[in-house]
Amino acid sequence: MVPLPLGGRNAYEGGVTDLPSLRESLDAHGLLAKKSFGQHFLLDLNITRKIVRLAGPFEGRAVIEVGPGPGGLTRALLESDAGRVVLVEKDPRFLPLLAELDDGSGRLVVVEADALGVREAELVEGPAHVVSNLPYNVGTPLLIKWLTGPWTPHALTLMFQKEVAERITAAPGDDAYGRLAVISQAVCEAKLVMHLPAAAFTPPPRVASAVVHLVPRADRPDRDLLKTLERVTAAAFGQRRKMLRSSLKQLGGAGLCEAAGISPEERAETIDLAGFLRLARASAGQTQTPAPSEAGVSLARRKRV
Ligand code: SAM
């Protein structure tokens, strides 16, 4: 992780509107998008300003942006009420261009790193937002990282492929409802707030995109319960067409469902968040305090999980 000493090297005097256009900046630095880094740029400041409006207000809190690329979203963040704007970019080709966004105040920090490996608590003090047009190839692992901690964001406003955005925000009964919806919504209030066609990006990806806004819940499960919830949802949706008594067999089957007040004949796709949380609590309870007559069964189950 390499924080770059920007310190006014290329400080500009005015606001971001005094900068050359994003296209001119890309041309001036001879930069072309690389597929391997999932690079699809937003070069229209009206769009990036709208995303930042949906993400804020920041009220002086820091914002982490993963993958600033040519800096379209960064420019909108710099116009906002964000305190610090911390950029994490893996492609070093963009660093000289990003340095040109520094006004010398110390508000902008650029870190050359793979966002999957950074420790956010070392980048920001206090509560911080994450706002990002995510590289599609690492979007879901990054979301899981922010959902499961240890670092907890104040809020997340993230661009995904439309199909992934729908999987995050799906409700029981939707085709897209599955593990990602349950885990995301157990930790956060999650809303799909904006759709964008492929043509909004340069170069255009093959699929449409959407922005999801996630705000961590005050009553989100602790890390242990979240791990159990991950195990329960993996088993239940691993065989989503089967009844729970059979898909959850290794975790207690019908007995577990009954302990959670759920019919063992239901299928994963009909169980809402509250139901999955009851299943996870019942499963955690079983593992922690097995009834004497069931102790052997629980141990055997634990080995198979
Ligand atoms: N934010 C810019 C925009 O909206 O125009 C660029 C978005 S582009 C979809 C994704 C960006 O993430 C690229 O700049 C790419 O180099 C960067 N990137 C890809 N993988 C990364 C990773 N693992 N960590 C940090 N940045 C990454």
Image (cartoon, helix red, strand yellow):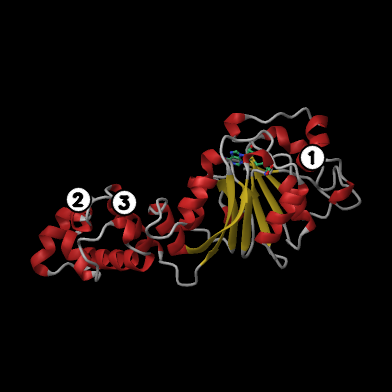
* Residue appearing at x 78%, y 45% in the figure: 6
Q: Is residue 16 left or right of residue 35?
A: right
Mark 3: few/some/many CA within 10 Å (<14, 14-19, 20+): some
Residue type pointed to by label 3:
Phe
Whole-percent x, y for residue 16 in the image: 84, 50
How many angstroms separate mark 2 from mark 3 (CA)? 20 Å
Residue at 22% across, 63% down: 287
Q: Name the spot of residue 254 as percent of width and height, x first.
A: 17, 62
Does the closest atom of ligand 1 sit within 8 Å of the Cβ of label 2? no
Q: What amino acid type should be assigned to the residue bearing mark 1? A: Leu
| Nearer mark to the viewer, of 1 and 2 | 1
| Kind of residue indicated by mark 2 | Lys
Q: Circle 1 is placed at which residue position?
A: 22
Give the CA distance from mark 1 to mark 2.
55 Å
- Kindly tell me whether mark 1's CB lies below 8 Å from ligand 1: yes
Q: CA distance from mark 1 to mark 3?
A: 43 Å
Q: Is residue 187 above or below residue 1?
A: below
Residue 149 seen by the camera: no
Q: Earlier in the sequence, mark 2 or mark 3?
A: 3
Q: Quadrant of residue 204?
A: top right
Q: Quadrant of ligand 1?
A: top right
Disc ID at residue 237: 3
Residue 121 picture location, percent across and down: 58, 57
Q: Residues within 10 Å of mark 2 (few under 14, many from 20)?
A: few
Q: Looking at the image, is 41 positioned above or below residue 301? A: above
Disc 1 on helix, strand or loop?
helix
Most foreground residue, 267 or 179: 267
**Are the two marked residues, 2 and 3, in contact with CB atoms closer than 8 angstroms?**
no
Q: Which residue is mark 2?
A: 303
* Residue 134 x/y as whole percent: 59, 45
* Crowd class of label 1 (few under 14; some 14 to 19; many from 20; radius 10 Å): some
